């Protein structure tokens, strides 16, 4: 059966990959369709206004109408399922870290998230659909692996896949799904694998790596196949759902930068780190305010969305109007590549003469964010002189409001990703830097190639915001599609991360901490390096223990009074016998798996075992919705019965000696993915327990203070 | 000081990266120079023969002379330092796995390896310098971090970097060095990071990841800088030390394959897996034979090298001679890219008319392996008809002998890598497949693009041989430099790995096992899934314990009689007190850190501690060359003295309960990087110990048999 189970596991992984690919394709197509519809009407209205065929303000009114309509649908989805707001990456990180947040991996969440993000992106808010795609992949994987859903309150076990109904399998599947999500968002299969490993794997397992790899490969294959349905037998198109476009070499066999420009790239990295840190700090403050004043009421959340959407719409319309200038379209485009010609076609006239002129600011705002990114990356500087396609002033006029709005928007009650806004504002920033440098010395035609600088700027701001490690590098490399940028990208991302970390942490971590989730980082906090802290000082010594054969009443009282997820079992000498999980105890009580009251005079700790009344598979069959203590109705006479925990106890639970260093404790806890660790003394007597919360940096700091000032505590 | 130490750590990491970059550059340049010299003379002699200006056979004689000369230098290097033979990747894997093989990270090994591989590559043996570069990086990192060398038997602590003299720091540095090595070999910085993580990190630490990342970035930066010394201010050259060249798109915006060809690629992957499995099996048998009959004598090893070299030389010369046919050089090359024109120039005339014709087989053999790979990847199929640059017969005539010789050569006493031979033979195989497919249907110009098929073949054979996971994919992607191949490469490598694994394991693992090194894989062996095996059955119950305060004589006898690296310390009740390492005990004895014989009548287990007579830093100062028991000279009256181990014991060593499942035991052992694990019972009394050897699949199988047939053992 091990083999059969393994085959089933791989089959399910294929399904996860394919399904996530289809979802991403659907979401992408729909949001493009929606936004194209919007732009078509708005462009037409704008031209009508110019020609005087429509009343002035019609375009703005139409624009506002569409934006508000789309945003309200997105907002309604979050109204239906509040956890579908935001990017979802913090939630997936937490899930992979071993913290099951409620309702995160439900089908309903998936539905609301995907539809919501489709509309919020189509509404032209400064949001991306990349984070939500990762979340979507995670839900798909969880749903497929569990084969169980509670949509509409009905528990439909529509498949018989119960071999995978446990935390470990589910987490492995979610890792696969997250990778598929990254892959579908960025066409970055390897970046996806690394994302899943970096966030999820406390332990690098070759088998899991291959499965994650396979899953994201399936997603990519699906995307390719769907995109190339018409040309299955011809050459496949390179077009991806999301791509940075093709970076052209300025000259054959040479890269678009000089060695010494790497120094400039690292400066851009540092600046990007600074921008990211500001972004994070501002968003943190806004989020704190929002948690206090908005988030407690659904109505307020919806009103906030509407207000913010109105603001975004107005600013978006105002910026090109303020700019006002019309720039002529480049004309000598014969030797331009297809991609560049397409970019010229995508320029937006706004109130200029269509087909001859364009509005620089509108070309960045009145278009989809991915197209705007491509414009910034690839638009050739036209003409012989210094005339730029996007002048420095236009870039600045776009960059400042856009990044401010992005800061404001992340956290409102719509599904919203952060990658694309960061990339877009970063690209504008980078191209701006390139322009300024190019002005310093325009004798050399290739110096400060604005496309390369835009790419570095995008990487820098994204890196400064997210602070992810190697997975982000690979994602960006794969999206760029060109290995010549590997060194500059590595350098830029590293500088951005180091600069940003001086001020605060990554935005996802900030949000995790604001939600007070006990998230454990991979590395032990620095405070652990103070060698004076040992397990003994970290643990909480207030241990609730039970005996191997215990009275029902005691267990019931314990479960009702304390929320602990595990209870140590100790024998008559106080020696650790094993541990019992809350879920198991509740199930035993609910199923009345205890001895009849007639056994009341038996020796409770004697060698005779009350035979197991429930099997493990019976206990686990209801995973993950075990009974709670409220489900257990006990008659008063039951309270004196005995439960024999010996067949159920985990007698080989990990323990740690009270003299173990804090670092060693942290490493055992984090690496083994524990939620509960018993601390024993030299004689294996339990002296305390350590839970996730005891290992958070703040808790450790408290322990350290307690150690250093023992007098204070007594006083 | 934590901060200062961290800065020093990063500084040393920079030095490692830069130094490895320089070494790789030097090695590459020198071997190119050497082989160019050889080819120049041989080509000239060949042309002279054709013109009748030289005696027939002069070219062969010259060729043999050069080959033998180079090979003998390579062989001499291995004579000087036997561990510098072979690829070095198995050794680095073992080191990162926690097994310190003797002399692997010495400066002398570095010198012999680098110089040796330079000559063995220049000699035209079917070997690459990629594996040795990884080894070189590891040695550089170890040397730089330890700042200590024993060249010529002198222990010159030339620096004061003793904060990094311990196993953990050294292993982290070696991981950085290995990444730098991969980066310098393939210009694949991210592949390098993944290689180090995959092989080394039992535990994914963000900090270490960044350091490894930084180190390989430094190597790449060094390589770029050195290569572009002349054009620092202009556009940097993309030319790398090792690259697959630039893959040109056959048409704009489309990839060079159809979706349905992915199926063909996976078939090639399976075939490559088969070829790799054959390669591994053959080499395994040859290696076993070699271990029995050759390796015990240095003279025999040198003779073998000479014989094999003679064989390679003769076959290399014979093949083009047998082929004999002269093909005309393509003439209409105006629209070809620079790269393609260079490839045309690189074709070898052999005995044909230079400048007009070339010998197809000689163009693959009589050139450097990297150039041959590029020919196979990029050479355009010339002309309108089916005439191919390399005809199928020529490819076959090259492929068969080359891969056979490669099987024979890996394992002889020269430094030799396996990547390039695998890639080259795989490329020939893949291009051959492409040819055959193209013949089936040549109506479609783009079907079965021979370059793409060559790339897939190369990936398939390499994957079938090495069976590495994600790191290999990334290395190949980075070397290819083109993201359009991400999906085909993933698919091919996955198929190759799965097919290969049906028959045997990767070649590096085979060699590790042949050397009987107790290497622990990341995943617990499958046998652990039999839940009936628990720690109790895996452990060896023959435990040698000592007391917290123990007589010198007892310790001395124990150390002399048993080779264990750790000894449990138990108190009077048999409860585990802690563990003592062999190194520590030897140091204590050598420094006579025991109570005077006048204390003979004290209560040995009383509460009064003999104050620590040696500090930890005194014990650790001699790392990694601790005294052995033979260094401890004891007078007979010393034997009754007491050593107080309590200040030195590791009281928080990891332990596991005897009822823990085999899987849990393996996971704890492997993930925490242990070498020794005490098994305790419920009362914390020691019942056995587990060492690395107990967890190898064979040992586990024995345990399982013992469990299942308890009768047999008694009988």
Image (cartoon, coloured by chain):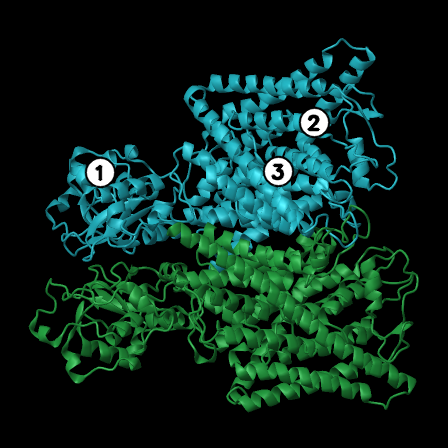
Chain colours: A green, B cyan
Determine whether B525 is above or below A693 in the image. above
Residue A279 placement: quadrant: bottom right
Q: Nearer the viewer, mark 2 or mark 3?
A: 2
Return the residue nearer the eye: A60 or B182: A60
Are tags 3 and 1 found on a single chain? yes
Q: Chain of mark 2?
A: B
Residue position marked by numbered label 2 in the rendering: B393
Q: Secondary structure at mark 3?
A: helix
Disc ID at residue B23: 3
Are tags 2 and 3 found on a single chain? yes
Identify which residue is drawn at 58% across, 79% down: A411
Q: Is residue A468 left or right of residue A550?
A: right
Q: Is residue B414 left or right of residue B435?
A: left
Residue position marked by numbered label 1 in the rendering: B558
Identify which residue is drawn at 44% across, 55% down: A203
Return the residue nearer the eye: B182 or A4: A4
């Amino acid at each position: 059966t091990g083999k059969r189970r393994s085959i089933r596991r791989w089959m399910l992984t294929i399904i996860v990959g394919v399904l996530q690919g289809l979802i991403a394709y659907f979401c992408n197509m729909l949001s493009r369709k929606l936004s194209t519809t919007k732009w078509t009407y708005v462009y037409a209205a704008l031209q009508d206004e110019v020609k005087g065929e429509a009343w002035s303000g019609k375009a703005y009114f139409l624009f506002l109408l569409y934006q508000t309509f789309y945003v309200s649908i997105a907002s309604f989805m979050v109204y239906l399922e509040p956890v579908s707001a935001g990017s979802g990456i913090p939630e997936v990180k937490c899930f992979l870290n071993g913290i099951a947040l409620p309702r995160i991996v439900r089908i309903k969440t998936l539905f609301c998230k995907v539809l919501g993000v489709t509309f919020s992106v189509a509404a032209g808010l400064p949001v991306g659909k990349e984070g939500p795609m990762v979340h979507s992949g995670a839900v798909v994987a969880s749903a497929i692996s569990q084969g169980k859903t509670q949509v509409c309150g009905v528990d439909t076990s529509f498949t018989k896949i119960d071999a995978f109904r446990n935390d470990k399998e589910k987490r492995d599947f979610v890792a696969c799904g997250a990778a598929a999500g990254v892959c579908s968002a960025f066409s970055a299969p390897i970046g996806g694998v690394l994302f899943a490993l970096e966030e999820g794997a406390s332990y690098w397992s070759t088998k899991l790596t291959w499965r994650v790899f396979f899953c994201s490969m399936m997603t990519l294959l699906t995307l390719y196949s769907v995109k190339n349905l018409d040309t299955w037998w011809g050459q496949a198109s390179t077009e991806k759902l999301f791509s940075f476009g093709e970076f052209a070499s300025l000259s054959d066999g040479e890269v678009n930068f000089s060695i010494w420009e790497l120094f400039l790239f690292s400066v851009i990295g540092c600046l990007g780190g600074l921008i990211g840190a500001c972004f994070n700090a501002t968003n943190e403050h806004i989020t704190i305010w929002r948690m206090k004043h908005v988030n407690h009421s659904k109505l307020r959340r919806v009103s906030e969305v509407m207000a913010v959407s109105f603001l975004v719409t107005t600013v978006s319309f105002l910026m090109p109007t303020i700019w006002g200038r019309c720039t002529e379209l480049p004309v000598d485009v014969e030797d331009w590549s297809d991609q560049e010609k397409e970019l010229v076609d995508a320029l937006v006239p706004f109130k200029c003469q269509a087909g001859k002129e364009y509005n620089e600011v509108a070309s960045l705002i009145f278009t989809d964010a991915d197209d705007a990114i491509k414009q910034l990356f690839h638009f050739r500087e036209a003409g012989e002189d210094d005339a730029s396609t996007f002048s420095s002033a236009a870039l600045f006029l776009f960059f400042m409001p856009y990044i401010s709005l992005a800061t404001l928007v992340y956290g409102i009650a719509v599904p919203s990703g952060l990658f694309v806004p960061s990339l877009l504002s970063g690209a504008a920033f980078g191209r701006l830097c390139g322009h300024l440098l190019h002005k310093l010395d325009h004798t050399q035609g290739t110096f400060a190639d604005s496309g390369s600088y835009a790419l570095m700027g995008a990487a820098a701001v994204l890196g400064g915001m997210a602070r992810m490690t190697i997975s982000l590098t690979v994602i960006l490399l794969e999206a760029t599609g060109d290995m010549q940028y590997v060194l500059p990208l590595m350098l830029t991302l590293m500088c951005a991360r180091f600069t940003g970390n001086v001020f605060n942490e990554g935005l996802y971590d900030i949000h995790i901490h604001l939600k007070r989730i006990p998230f454990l980082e991979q590395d032990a906090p620095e405070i652990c390096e103070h060698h004076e802290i040992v397990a003994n000082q970290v643990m909480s010594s207030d241990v609730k223990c039970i005996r191997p054969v215990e009275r029902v009443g005691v267990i019931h009282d314990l479960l009702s009074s304390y929320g602990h997820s595990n209870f140590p079992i100790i024998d008559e000498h106080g020696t650790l016998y094993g541990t019992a999980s809350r879920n198991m105890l509740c199930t035993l009580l609910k199923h009345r798996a205890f001895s009849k009251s007639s056994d009341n005079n038996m020796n409770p700790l004697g060698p005779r075992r009350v035979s197991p009344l429930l099997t493990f598979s019976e206990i686990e069959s209801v995973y993950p919705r075990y009974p709670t203590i409220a489900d257990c109705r006990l008659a008063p006479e039951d309270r004196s019965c005995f439960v024999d925990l010996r067949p159920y106890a985990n007698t080989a639970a990990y323990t740690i000696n009270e003299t173990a260093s804090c670092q060693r404790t942290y490493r055992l806890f984090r690496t083994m993915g524990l939620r509960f660790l018993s601390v024993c003394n030299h004689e294996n007597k339990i002296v305390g327990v350590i839970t996730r919360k005891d290992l958070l940096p703040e808790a450790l700091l408290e322990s350290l203070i307690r150690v250093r000032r023992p007098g204070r505590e007594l006083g």
